[in-house]
Amino acid sequence: MNIRQFKIFIDFDGTISQVDIGESLFREFGNKEKVNTIIDDLLNEKISSKQSWIELCDLVFSITSDELNKFIDAINVDSTFTAFTEFCKDRNYEIYVLSDGFD
């Protein structure tokens, strides 16, 4: 008898977190207008995901540890995510978190 083993793949930004953390980070610490242009170019397939990250990272010159920690502390996780992980754990479903192709 075949026993199916479920594996759940979850995107992080906008699924586990309530916002896209990368977009929020670059809007907070970079030039908002340029960030919006880069994101629009990505969404309209004018540039690749890799190119968008290169351009976005070039917009941010300095973030202190305190600034980054305050930013991270303000990010909210979806209120249903903990219950969902418990549901999966109770059923032995494996959960994998994915985020824009990063390992």
Image (cartoon, rainbow, N blue to C red):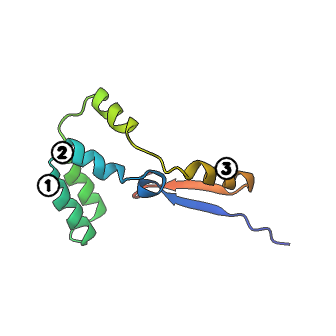
Q: Is residue 54 left or right of residue 102?
A: left
Instruction: Write the residue at 73% across / 55% down.
Output: 92
Residue 30's tag is 2
Picture coordinates of residue 30, whole percent (x, y): 18, 45
Q: Secondary structure at mark 1?
A: helix
Tell me the amino acid under the disc marked 1.
Answer: Lys
Q: Pick the quarter of the image with the N terminus.
A: bottom right
Quadrant for residue 9, please give it. bottom right
Dot 1 corresponds to which residue?
A: 34
Q: Secondary structure at mark 3?
A: helix
The residue carrying pointer 2 sits among few (fewer than 14), some (14 to 19) or many (20 or more) residues within 10 Å by Cα, namely many
- Contact between marks 1 and 2 (CB within 8 A): the answer is yes
Q: Is residue 2 left or right of residue 18?
A: right
Seen as rendered, the residue at the extreme front is 79
The amino acid type, in three-letter code, at marker 2 is: Gly
N-term-proximal mark, 3 vs 1? 1
Residue denoted by label 3: 86
